[in-house]
Image (cartoon, grey):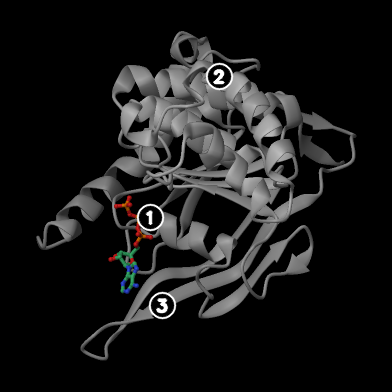
Amino acid sequence: MLTVVAENGRTVAGAAPASEAIGLAGVEIAFRLADGRRFEAVAPTDLVVREGEFVAIVGPTGCGKSTLLNAAAGLLKPTSGTVRIFGRTLTGLNGEAGYLFQQDSLMPWKSVVDNVAIALTVSGTPRREARERAMGWLERVGLAAFADRYPHMLSGGQRKRVGLAQVLIRNPRLLLMDEPFGPLDAQTRVIMGDLLLELWSAERKAVMFVTHDLEEAIALSDRVVIMSAGPKARVIGDYAIPIPRPRAIADVRLDPHFHDIHREIWNALKEEVVKGYRQSNGLAP
Ligand SMILES: Nc1ncnc2c1ncn2[C@@H]1O[C@H](COP(=O)(O)OP(=O)(O)OP(=O)(O)O)[C@@H](O)[C@H]1O
């Protein structure tokens, strides 16, 4: 029997499986340290994100979440194994992906609308058309009234909205997000999470979302993948999140499934979090 994760995150039988957007096959990542030693950050890992799927990767600090994401982005070549993007082996930068990192990449000398428009003008779209489309995106992220401001005149949450518009205007086929809301306060994170879900649900691009925040991961995702503490970090759990969509982040915690899922994942994760914390503080494991 075929089993797939449906749009609402529940598994259903009988339907054709969604195609693979990102496929990590035996991806192992080791770094050469300054003293010549080899540090094996991520043990051979298999992970698939299907088209239309929102997958969060959660794990202890320093376990290798960003490293895996960077491999999917083509910013880092795996020591062994392959990264497939829509079925093709990735050899350079991943041109199908839009990235959103913890640090935004706004240009301080450009207005908000030009910061968004530049994502198009760099690839040859005429400036006027790019600015028109940028205005459309600023409306979608609720910032049309701030189009002529400069980045230093924006709050952290507003800067993140510009960052989202900057990424989505290029219409990438998939999104790679590394703690994108990390620097924001708790309330703004909820608002940004809702905005992200609203935008995502319109087109259902594949998303790989790195976070250390388990609640955020459950609230946003179709699947939560958890990693062990490093070195040689590996995937130790992969959980489907059966909470119906559309979701409002603040209400997800009230869903009867939420506490059970949270408890189950946290039970699998907590020992690794303690290990990761001790390692990152130079303490004995
Ligand atoms: N260029 C590098 N050279 C050597 N070691 C590295 C390099 N990049 C990352 N590492 C190590 O690889 C491990 C994984 O790092 P990574 O940034 O992927 O972790 P993370 O899970 O994203 O951490 P956090 O949650 O704290 O952001 C860490 O031990 C880190 O010190």
Could you tell me the amino acid type at mark 2?
A: Ala
The residue nearer to you, when weighing 130 against 237, is 130
Answer with the quarter of the image where residue 207 lies. top right
Residue shown at 39% from the left, 63% from the top: 233
Residue 70's place in the image compared with 34, above or below, is above
Could you tell me the amino acid type at mark 1?
A: Ser
**Residue 15, image x, y percentages:** 89, 35
Q: Specify whether 145 is left or right of 58.
A: right
Q: Which residue is mark 1?
A: 228
Q: Which residue is mark 2?
A: 144
Residue 79's place in the image compared with 144, above or below, is below
- The label nearer to you, 3 versus 2, is 2
Could you tell me the amino acid type at mark 3?
A: Ala
Q: Specify whether 154 is left or right of 119.
A: left
The residue nearer to you, when weighing 30 against 134, is 134
Crowd around label 2: few <14 · some 14–19 · many ≥20 (10 Å): some
Residue 32's place in the image compared with 275, above or below, is below
| Mark toward the start of the polypeptide (3 vs 1) | 3
Residue shown at 81% from the left, 49% from the top: 19
Q: Secondary structure at mark 2?
A: helix
Image quarter for ligand 1 equals: bottom left
Q: Specify whether 78 is left or right of 227.
A: right
Disc 3 versus disc 2: distance between alpha carbons?
45 Å
Residue 30, numbered circle: 3
Disc 2 versus disc 1: distance between alpha carbons?
43 Å
**Residue 26, image x, y percentages:** 59, 71
